[in-house]
Image: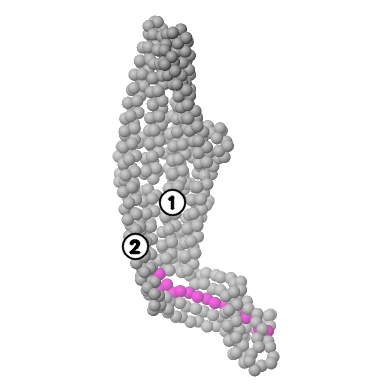
Amino acid sequence: MLKKKIIALLLAGFMLSEISPVATFAFGNKSNSKAVKKVSISKSHKQRAKNDAFKYEYINYNWWNQYNDSILTGYIDRAIKNNYDLKNATIAVDEYYQAVKIQFANELPSATVGFSPAFVKNPNVTNTDWMFATPAFANYELDLFLKNHDKTKAVKKQYEGSLQDERAAYISIASAVGTTYFNIVKLDKMIELQEEIVSDRKLIYDLMLARNKEGLTSTADTVKANKAYIAGDTDLTEYKKQRSKLLNQLCVLIGENPNNADKITRINYDELNFSGIIPTEISSDIISERPDYIKAERMVEKAGIDVRVAKKEFLPTLNITGVALFLSNNFTSAWSTKGALAALAGGAILPLFTGGRRIANLKLKKDTYERVLNNYYQTNLTAIQEINDALVTIKLDEQKYADIQKQAQLEREDFNYSQNKYEQGVISKLDLTQVKENVLFTDKAVVNDKINCLVNYIGLYKAVGSKL
């Protein structure tokens, strides 16, 4: 009779333990090398939460100091702390870290306990009994072929890849802050010069209008002067619109409300001073430092591990299972050893027919590996292209900037000659003002090319993964 009760309660306990609240524990051997490696990753990840130094290492903060602009570095610092895209990138890293911990738990034994009261009535017996069962189950998949360990290694590669995604995000946001900031400084100067052009064109139109009334200038020339004045004012409005949009964009990048765009300060254009040295050649080894290259490398490694895991799916699964059950008809003695039952079993499971699933999965993983490998090669080529593009752009734009500076100097000398002629009464105020516009136009070209050079340096910085 007791044996029947034990069997009945064992079955009841097993069923109830599947649906009732339970506590699950994982146990590991501290001397195991896998556990030691896991702790190392854990320590590294915890240090990230305590210290933000890695973020400044991502963007090579010292490089930005070469612009000698504390306002710019201040905005980059605010972006690092407040930009929501960067916060999401960091959260994504933590998500992958938790995935590593979840997968690592599959390498360890698991234990489940529960509590199951039962009302028992056996066949051919009139009396009934209350019984209490406390089932405990332990299971361990013997990782003899290291399949679970390989799965953990694959997830770790994803975690390492997420670190590179995070690094790429920080470099991208810092580059966007710098580029936007310098374009705002450029527009400040453009607006200043354009306001002077508009003022001069207004003067030209007024002079020609007065001369037209005296019959000295044709109506057609007067209309052209008016059209030039209106066109200049239109360009001024466009510059102001572009600056407003960039100010709003900079606010978003640094985590500021765009409504506060009018509070965005910046350096004066004439105070810009980049003191860094831009290399004319870049070693091909620098490509291996780019975050996209490192991530592509990690993904190739992960794909290779996935193929290995797919092959191991053809091997048997080895399990060790332990069951313990404490029985009692009295709650106070529910954990007494008198009614204890324990069992330990091991087994091997090998699927014989899965409809071709395992073969298809292996082929899928091999195809994935080939695709990821091709992506790795493409990333390498793209990196070389971007660095070469950045270097040639810097070289040619610096040459263009030097040429436009010479042209601006010549225009200014020409204006000085015209000013002397005006003072001598050789030319009119109208002629002098028209010559002055040429100076202002070349000054605008100088401003544009100078800012382009500064932005090009950022392009190279981004292309080499901030390793300048």
Residue 406 falls within the magenta-colored stretch: no
In x, y percent, where is residue 318?
43, 77
On screen, 461 above or below 241?
below
Q: Earlier in the sequence, mark 2 or mark 1?
A: 1
On screen, 238 above or below 135?
above
In x, y percent, where is residue 109?
49, 72
In x, y percent, where is residue 63?
42, 39
- Look at the numbered disc 1 and give the secondary structure of its residue: helix
Q: Nearer the viewer, residue 1 or 369?
A: 369
Q: Nearer the viewer, residue 168 or 423?
A: 423
Classify 10 Å Cα crowding around label 2: few (below 14), some (14-19), many (20 and above): some
Q: How is the image coloured?
A: one colour
On-image quarter of the C terminus: top left
Distance from disc 2 to disc 1, alpha carbons, whole Å, reads 24 Å
Which residues make up the magenta segment? Answer: 130-147
On screen, 290 above or below 198?
below
Residue at 45% x, 13% y is: 208
In the image, what residue type sits under mark 2? Asp
Residue at 54% x, 80% y is: 323
Residue at 38% x, 19% y is: 438
Q: Which residue is mark 2?
A: 367
In the image, what residue type sits under mark 1? Asp
- Look at the numbered disc 2 and give the secondary structure of its residue: helix
Q: Which residue is mark 1?
A: 165
> Which quadrant holds residue 299?
bottom left
Residue 139 falls within the magenta-colored stretch: yes
On screen, 43 above or below 216?
below
Instruction: Residue 410: tell me if it is visible.
Output: yes
Residue at 67% x, 81% y is: 333
In x, y percent, where is residue 313?
39, 72
> Which quadrant holds residue 174?
top left
Instruction: Residue 75: tell me if it is visible.
Output: no
